Image (tube, grey):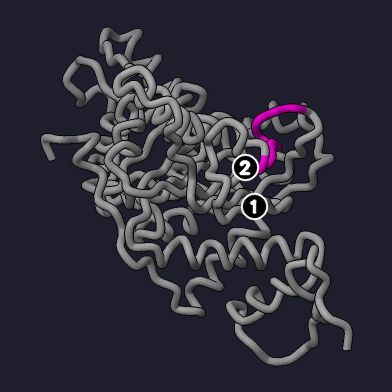
Amino acid sequence: MSEIPDFAYGEVKALDVKERSIHELLLAMNDISFQGRALGEAYRILIDMFNDPENTIFLGLAGSISTAGMWKIIKWLVEERYVDVVVSTGAIISEDIYEAMGFKYYKVHPCIDDAMLLERKYDRFYDTVANELDYRKMEGLIREFVETLPEGVYSTPEFLYEFGKFLNEKGIDSIVAAAYRAKVPVFSPALVDSGYGMGLLLAYRSGKHIVLDMVKDFYQLVEIGRHSKKVSAIYIGGGVPKDYVNLMTVAQTLIAEYEEGRHDYYKGFEYIVQFTTDMPQWGGLSGATLEEAVSWGKVSPHAKKRTVHVDATIALPIIAHGLLVGRVKRKNPQNVLEVVVKKH
């Protein structure tokens, strides 16, 4: 038998068909090739990430994954405390509320007549539709919540903590309601780019002035990083949430330089995986490689890291069920909510 060459890190092993759990299958996929290997290696890194007792884990969420039936998986990850901080687009943490309120998404062909949908008041997300009038009721619920708030300045995790409490009391079991119960802060740096924007706008026009302070928002995110011994990240998609969390690590370097006179300090991610359909050659952050992030100090040069080029609707169910069946638990969840919402 030939020896493994010094430039290789293992041998490829053909995957045989036999009875085994999805957890065992994912571990075996470490030894195949292409995106199958990437998925298996990402799963292995996630297990190491969850087993590290000094690790604060950030979950970045982008894309239309709540409409695609993925929001209960995200809620489960929060409830089981696999993650300590959520950074999401506004769409993901509003379009789950739509279904949690009892409204339905429906399957359609992606080549359906959109003019007909407009006439019949249905909004399309590729091969899925939502009733526009029901969608407005979800936005109206957000407005109803905003009307209950004292006027003032909020960061998005402060705002969403109160919203999670509001939803929890109404029995609307969504991602932010689960985060409220689990004491996991939820950031949304582009919150108004969603149904939240409509609810806030309508409340604003009626005289209810709620200000979302994005500098305070970023300060709180950075403070979580500063209070953490180690930081790690899981990215579903890219977009603003990915860069927002990445910049938290860059801020550690700048603060050390400007406030402490340290010019060689980096606090990059120790473990990091991303599941994305974007590609790096267009130069955008959504497809940027984790190797590129090392040059910025965002990811440690010694980090365990893996990108998987896969649709989130494929990766999330497989990974979540692997964790469940494999009885993979978080070793030591970090309680960081008090950094954001000190009065609680």
Q: Residue at x 44, y 21 (%)?
A: 197
Nearest to N terminus: mark 1 or mark 2: 2
Of the pair 85 and 210, the residue shown nearer to us: 85
Q: Quadrant of residue 254?
A: top left
Instruction: Report the residue that reaches farthest toward the left.
Output: 343
Furthest-bottom residue in this view: 19
Q: Is residue 30 above or below residue 55?
A: below
Residue 290, magenta (yes or no): yes
- The disc at residue 312 is 1
Label 2: few (<14), some or many (≥20) within 10 Å? many
Front residue of 188/198: it is 188
The answer to whether residue 128 is magenta is: no
Residue ID for mark 2: 237
Q: Amino acid at mark 2?
A: Gly
Q: Read off the magenta span.
A: 283-291
Look at the numbered disc 2 and give the secondary structure of its residue: loop
- Element carrying mark 1: helix
Whether the residues at callouts 1 and 2 have beta carbons within 8 Å, the answer is: yes
User: Based on the displayed image, in which of its 4 quarters is residue 143 positioned?
Assistant: top left
The answer to whether residue 52 is left or right of residue 334 is right
Query: Which residue does the image show at 35% across and 38% down from the upper left?
Result: 225
Dominant SS of magenta comes to loop
**Can residue 209 be seen here?**
yes
Vertical arrangement, residue 144 with respect to residue 200, above or below: below
Image location of residue 209, percent across then percent down: 27, 11
Left or right of residue 21: residue 4: right
Distance, label 1 to label 2, CA atoms, is 7 Å
Quarter of the image that includes the N terminus: bottom right
Give how far across and how far down residue 48 sits, in percent: 48, 66
Residue 170: mark:
none
Pick the quarter of the image with the C terminus. Answer: top left
Question: Which residue sits at x=61%, y=81%?
Answer: 24
